[in-house]
Amino acid sequence: MNAIALPESWREHAIVTRDVAIARDWFTDAELAEADAFRLPKRREEWMHARMAAKQLAVNRGLASHPREVLVTRVRFSLSHSHPYAAAAIGRGIDVQVIREISESAAHLFLSDEEAEAMRACSVEHRLLHFWCAKEAAWKAQRGEVPTLKQVPLKLIDIQPHGLRFDGVETLWTAAAAAVQRDVIIALTF
Ligand SMILES: CC(C)(COP(=O)(O)OP(=O)(O)OC[C@H]1O[C@@H](n2cnc3c(N)ncnc32)[C@H](O)[C@@H]1OP(=O)(O)O)[C@@H](O)C(=O)NCCC(=O)NCCS
C-alpha cells in the first residue's frame, strides 16, 4: 500500500495513503454491498480508500492478519478522504486536506473571532487550511457530539518546523515527513 511517511509518534495511531488501487478482496460481502450502493463512483472510491487505510492500520498494529477480518466502524476508526489521499486513525481524530487555495473570508464560518485572529497572526502558508484541518480532526475525535465546527475550541500553541501544534491536535505538511509531494495537510488529535 502506498502509505505516506508519518512521524514516529503518529505511526501507531494513524495511516495516510495516496493513489491506492481498490482491492475488493479486502472487503466482506456486506461492506461491498454498502460500497456498491453509492451511485457516484467517486464517492464509492473514497469510501473504500478510507476503509482500506483503516484495515491496513489495524493489520499493521497486529489487530488482524488479513484486511478482510477488520470491520471498519466509526466507533473504532476516524476516517478522512481528500482525493487522492485517504486516512484513518485509531483512538484519535484525523483529517486530510489536499492543499488548495481557499479564501480567508470563509474563516468566520468555522473559526471564532479569537481563532481567526490567531490564524491571521500565523505566518505559515495555507494557514486557514491548517486551522480547518485541525478543527475537522478535533470534531471527529468528539464523534460529532458538538453540532458545528465553530463550537470546537482550537488554541494555537506553537508553530513547528513540520506543521502547527494546537491544544490537543497537530497538523503536518507532508514534505516535512519526507513524502513525495508537498500537497496535503494532515491533522491528528493527541
Ligand atoms: C462530516 C465532516 C467532518 C466531513 O468532513 P470532510 O472534510 O468533508 O470529509 P472527510 O473525508 O475528512 O471526513 C468524512 C468522514 O468523516 C467521518 N464522520 C462523519 N460524521 C462523523 C461523526 N459524527 N463523528 C466522527 N466521524 C464522522 C465519516 O467516517 C466520513 O467518511 P465516510 O463518509 O466515508 O464514512 C464535515 O461535514 C464537518 O465538518 N462537519 C461538522 C459540522 C460543521 O460544522 N459543518 C460546517 C462546516 S463549515
Image (cartoon, grey):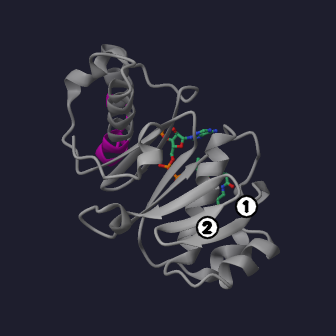
Callout 2: SS: helix
Amino acid marked by disc 1: Leu
Q: Which residue does the image show at 66% across and 61% down from the upper left?
A: 166
Q: Considering only vertical position in the picture, is 141 above or below 119?
A: above
Find the distance from the CA under tag 2 to the CA under tag 1.
8 Å
What residue span does the magenta drawing correspond to?
A: 36-46
Q: Quadrant of residue 52?
A: top left
Amino acid marked by disc 2: Phe
Q: Main secondary structure of the magenta part?
A: helix
Q: Does the magenta stretch include residue 55?
A: no
Q: Considering only vertical position in the picture, is 89 above or below 139?
A: above
Q: Is residue 37 magenta?
A: yes
Relative placement, left or right, of 163 versus 53 is right
Quarter of the image where the N terminus is located: top left
Cβ–Cβ below 8 Å for labels 2 and 1? yes
Residue at image mark 2 = 131
- Frontmost residue, 81 versus 14: 14
Q: What crowding class fits label 2: few (fewer than 14 Cα within 10 Å), some (14-19), or many (20 or more)?
A: many
Question: Any mark on residue 26, and which?
Answer: none
Residue at image mark 1 = 154
Across and down, in percent, residue 126 comes to 50, 77
Q: Considering only vertical position in the picture, is 8 above or below 70?
A: below
Q: Which residue does the image show at 30% across and 52% down from the upper left?
A: 4
Relative placement, left or right, of 72 versus 139 is left
Q: What crowding class fits label 1: few (fewer than 14 Cα within 10 Å), some (14-19), or many (20 or more)?
A: many
* Sequence order check, earlier mark of 2 and 1: 2
Across and down, in percent, residue 41 comes to 29, 44
